[in-house]
Image: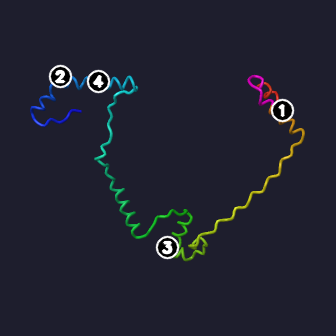
Amino acid sequence: MAQQPEDKQTADIFEHPALQADEKAKREAEELHLAEEHALVPVRAFIKDPARAEKKSKGAERVAKHRAKQAEAGLVSLPIPKEAAEAIKATEGGWHTWLALQKSPQLDLQPAQPPTPQPAPKPEPVRLTAEQERLIALGRRVEALRGWRRLLVSRFLG
């Protein structure tokens, strides 16, 4: 990169055609080196200017402000099942009344004890008859066949 000239006389030196041709030759040599040695091609690209941040929509700003107010007040959003929401709406007096009517152990603030894991029962070994073992061996031999022999035998056996 060329440096910024400090005065008019220096500016004339930087604008000299011989110097500009030399800069152009250096740039072309560098591009040729990158193309031949590293298989790179010059590309012109546009990227977003990080200095210009995209503005939020007014709706997004309102939602963010509402959530901040809710958090300051100590309220949280909680998804609940549709059936529970309908039951709360149907209760006269709102959710305070509905909550008072509930006798659920889930409303206790004590953490529930996790169930103790039970070991799975061991399955009994399967006992095969001699005929079943013979058919399994035949199936393995058919599976080992390749090409047209496998196709012919599998069609024959059904």
For the residue pair 156 and 22, the one nearer the viewer reads as 22
Q: Hey, what amino acid is under mark 4?
A: Glu
Q: Which mark is residue 127?
A: none
Q: Which comes before the other along the chain, label 3 or label 1?
A: 3
**Type of secondary structure dominating the magenta stretch:** helix
Q: Which x, y percent locates residue 83? A: 56, 64
Gap in angstroms between the C-alphas marked 4 and 2:
15 Å
Near mark 4 (Cα within 10 A), the count class, few <14, some 14-19 or many ≥20, is few
Mark count:
4
Q: Which comes before the other along the chain, label 4 or label 2?
A: 2
Q: Secondary structure at mark 2?
A: helix
Q: Which mark is residue 28?
A: 4
Q: Which comes before the other along the chain, label 1 or label 2?
A: 2
Residue at which label 3 appears: 94
For the residue pair 93 and 142, the one nearer the viewer reads as 142
Q: Which comes before the other along the chain, label 3 or label 2?
A: 2
Q: Secondary structure at mark 3?
A: helix
Q: Secondary structure at mark 1?
A: helix
Determine whether 47 is above or below 100 in the image: above
Q: Over which residues does the magenta segment extend?
A: 141-150
Residue at which label 2 appears: 18
